[in-house]
Amino acid sequence: MKVLVVDDSAIMRKVIISILNSMDIATEDIEQAEDGVQAVNKASASQYNIILMDWNMPNMLGIDAVREIRASGNKTPILMVTTEGERTNVITAIQAGANNYLVKPFNAGDLRDKLGELISN
């Protein structure tokens, strides 16, 4: 399973990668991006089984990256992982092409559950 973790916080990326590792996803199968621009570039250059996308990042917001990834025809499941928990933001993300939504702070079980839902679909 190949995963792209997109977050401007190196600490948050490390936390997510640790949880992914605990799910038997090898570190070498996990790539990282620090903003939406890097995410779009990586998503167009490589195939991923899932993308975990933050909303608030420099250079390009995660929501805009989701729109660009979808506009390119990429169907990779995208999980928004963000502090933006308002209902309108969840709706906006789903309309933009995100497959699911996880609000920070979250625990390992929450992330496992959301990933399980996306992987089983």
Image (cartoon, helix red, strand yellow):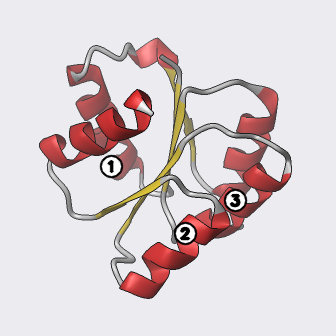
Q: Residue at x 75, y 50 (%)?
A: 69
Q: Amino acid at mark 1?
A: Ile
* Closest to the observer, 108 or 49: 49
Q: Where 5 falls versus 1 (above or below)?
A: below
Examine the image and state in which quarter residue 96 appears: bottom right
Pointer 1 residue: 11
Pointer 2 residue: 93
Tell me residue 71's x, y (percent).
Answer: 83, 55
Q: Amino acid at mark 2?
A: Ala
Task: Indicate left or right for 24 with 57 as reference.
Answer: left
Q: Is residue 101 visible?
A: yes
Of tags 1 and 2, the one toward the viewer is 2
Q: Residue at x 33, y 77 (%)?
A: 85
Q: Residue at x 20, y 22 (%)?
A: 22
CA gap between label 1 and label 2 equals: 23 Å
* Closest to the observer, 17 or 109: 109
Secondary structure beneath disc 2? helix
* Closest to the observer, 8 or 62: 62
Q: Amino acid at mark 3?
A: Ala
Neighbor class of circle 3 (other Cα within 10 Å; few <14, some 14-19, many 20+) is many
What number is the disc on residue 65?
3
Of tags 3 and 1, the one toward the viewer is 3
Tell me residue 79's x, y (percent).
Answer: 46, 50
